[in-house]
Amino acid sequence: MLEVILRRVISIIPVLFGVSLITFGLIHIIPGDPAIVIAGPDASADQVQSIRELLELDRPLHIQMGAWYMNLFQGDLGNSFMLGRSVVQAVQERLPTTLLLTTYSIIISMPIGIAAGLLAAYRQNTWVDTTVMTVALLGVSVPSFWLSIMGILVFSVALGWLPSSGYVPPSEGIIACLRSLTLPAISLAVLQIGLLARMTRATTLEVLRQDFIRTARAKGVSEWKTVGRHALSNVMIPIVTVVGLLVNIAIAGAVVIEQIFVLPGVGQLVVQGILRRDYPVIQGSILAVAVLLVLINLVVDLLYAYLDPRLRND
């Protein structure tokens, strides 16, 4: 198991280097000059050039890249052009909101998605199976931003049950915090529920056709024990992989959801950085999200290897 951990950790290094390299290259390819954005539309050419020199944007690209990597190895992601403080500090302030939103959506989706998939498999080819799979198909087909808007119209505007925007940190009250995140979390969770239900149903049907399930039934083991004890333990192995994928999807989807609900997360920080051409913020935020996703995938890989010993030698 230790060898598996070392292999997975070593494999992270080229991934993060590739992400940082691509991010650095892309933001310098897209149109727009941060110096012009900062100086404003009425600034003279000399003023724009002064800002460019102050931010060291006039230096050759490879020199800028070398300086950025040197700072990165020292744990410094640079200073934001627009925020006037370090990118590390800005990311640290925003990351808890994104993690809380993602965790909340996973907590909502996992029990519902897995239960729906198990129910559909156990009631295969009945109206229950058809209804669950139809709803699951709708869940994976409907865009999250459309669900967000519909949720705001129904639960905020019409019923007044939940706030339509804004974020309350946990330090100001857990209930108020959960209320502010409920609509965004549900908007993210619908897609996850649909994917989980479909995956769980397919996996459960495959497991229920295995010989050890037929043997358990032939020995007179109750259907509850057959499904709950023998089938479920085997179903959970591939589901672990799907949960890791769902976390990745939730974090990626948070970029849009945080904009709609005005949540101060990393996704909103990335969008603001792009609009303002704030290169350090874009690079630092995307790298922080990449590190988070890589670590989540690492945990999933290790958990998968722990649950299925055959994968430890792959």
Image: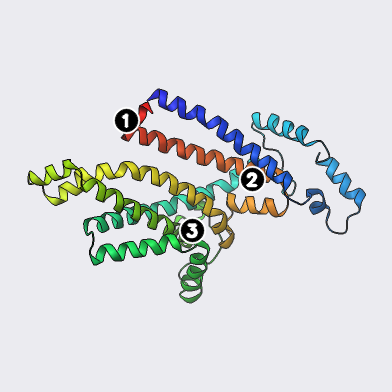
Q: Earlier in the sequence, mark 1 or mark 2?
A: 2
The answer to whether residue 181 is left or right of residue 79 is left
The answer to whether residue 304 is left or right of residue 10 is left
Which disc is residue 310 wearing?
1
Q: In which quadrant of the rendered view does residue 61 lie?
A: top right
Residue 301 on image: x %, y %: 41, 35
Q: Sort mark 1 into few (<14), some (14-19) or many (20+) by Cα contacts within 10 Å.
A: few
Is residue 159 in view from this perspective? yes
Q: In which quadrant of the rendered view does residue 21 lie?
A: top right
Q: CA distance from mark 1 to mark 2?
A: 43 Å
Read off the residue under disc 2.
Answer: 90
Label 3 is placed on what type of residue?
A: Leu
Residue 218 on image: x %, y %: 8, 45
Residue 224 on image: x %, y %: 16, 51
Q: Secondary structure at mark 3?
A: helix
CB within 8 Å, label 1 to label 2: no
What quarter of the picture does the C terminus occupy?
top left
- Say which of marks 1 and 2 sits in front: 1
Q: Sort mark 2 into few (<14), some (14-19) or many (20+) by Cα contacts within 10 Å.
A: some
Q: Secondary structure at mark 2?
A: helix
Is residue 84 in view from this perspective? no
Q: Relative to residue 195, is residue 77 depicted above or below?
A: above
Q: Sort mark 3 into few (<14), some (14-19) or many (20+) by Cα contacts within 10 Å.
A: many
Read off the residue under disc 3.
Answer: 181
Q: Residue at x 82, y 36 (%)?
A: 59
Q: Relative to residue 106, is residue 130 depicted above or below?
A: below
